[in-house]
Amino acid sequence: MAIRIRWKPEAASKGGTPVKLDGNSAVPLYEQMKIQLQEQIAAHIYAAGDRLPAEKELCEKYGVSRVTLRRAVDELVAEGILERKQGKGTFVAAKKCRVIFRKMNSIGGGFTDAVYPDTDKHTIVVSKKEYICNALEREKLGLSKDERVLVLLRLMTLDGQPFMIDRAVYPVNRFPGLFDRVKDDVSTYAILREDYGIHRLTSQRELGLAYATDEQAKLLGCSAGAPLFRIFKQVCDTEGNPVHLSNLFFSVDRIVFTDDGE
């Protein structure tokens, strides 16, 4: 049976006294370096999104070689704790949010129900527009040529950070007055249930990959062209009548889809 020896580093701050690692310990120096960085991240000395100091500075601070430091950082990158950005350096990775994929179309709340409960969730209405439906909307929503649709663009945040963009399209004639009912932190599914009597929904979903437009990059705080998860949903009532279309966009480095949960 293998015995894992854990080395306990002393506390340190970003600008505090350099912490030298123990060359006489049974724990390899790269492992000590890794533990030191993990504990500083856990203590928010280096917070999510922070750039780590340059290699030279870290090597001098901890008394290790570049080979030792790089091995520690490589392992933390592989574990998703750190991330490298080309031409910019190494950063503390944002905490990934677990989303229950099968609850993404829940009539009880959708986004709220699908995200694990230990997060502060908010929905911000970015824009509301009405226009004449295009060919895809006409086909998927069963509309005539000149019918109008409400296009709702919302940003969902978790713990104060941008998390998901929802672009949803609703037929105006079926949901008169919906434009004025949609507000920040108000569930559209709750509106459908309480104001339009739609208590159950079904949906078809497609999961794919997209690349952030300039507008999406600005909303999500990522680079234009960054990879995004995209979920396309066609939502119907229990009689098969189309309710809305929706495209959901997530930053791939901030989300883990799971199928567990009650």
Image (cartoon, rainbow, N blue to C red):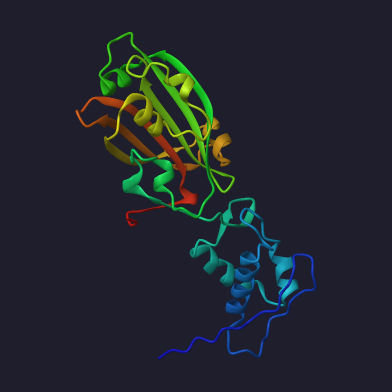
Q: Residue extending furthest top?
A: 146
Q: How far across and down, in percent of the image, does residue 254 sit?
A: 49, 50
Q: Where in the figure is residue 59, as x and y percent of width and height?
A: 71, 71
3 relative to 248, above or below? below
| Residue at the image point whose x is 50% and y is 55% from the top | 118
**Near-viewer residue (18 or 234):** 234
Q: Residue furthest left?
A: 239
Asked whether the viewer can see residue 229, the reply is no
* Residue 64 point in image, percent of width and height: 68, 77
Q: How many callouts does the rendering have?
A: 0
Q: In the displayed structure, does residue 94 sit left or right of residue 148? A: right
Residue 29: image quadrant is bottom right
Q: Residue at x 60, y 74 (%)?
A: 35
Answer yes or no: is residue 153 visible: yes
- Residue 229 percent coordinates (x, y): 41, 43
Please give the name of the residue rendered at 39% of the width and 47% of the height, measured from the top-left corner. Answer: 114
Horizontal arrangement in the rendering, residue 144 relative to residue 63 (left or right): left
Up/down of 16 relative to 103, above or below: below
Q: Could you tell me which residue is drawn at 75 percent across and 68 percent down?
A: 13
Q: In the picture provided, is 24 more to the left or to the right than 110?
A: right
Question: Dividing the image into 4 quarters, which one contains the C terminus?
Answer: bottom left
**Nearer-the-camera pick, 42 or 172:** 172
The answer to which image quadrant residue 176 occupies is top left
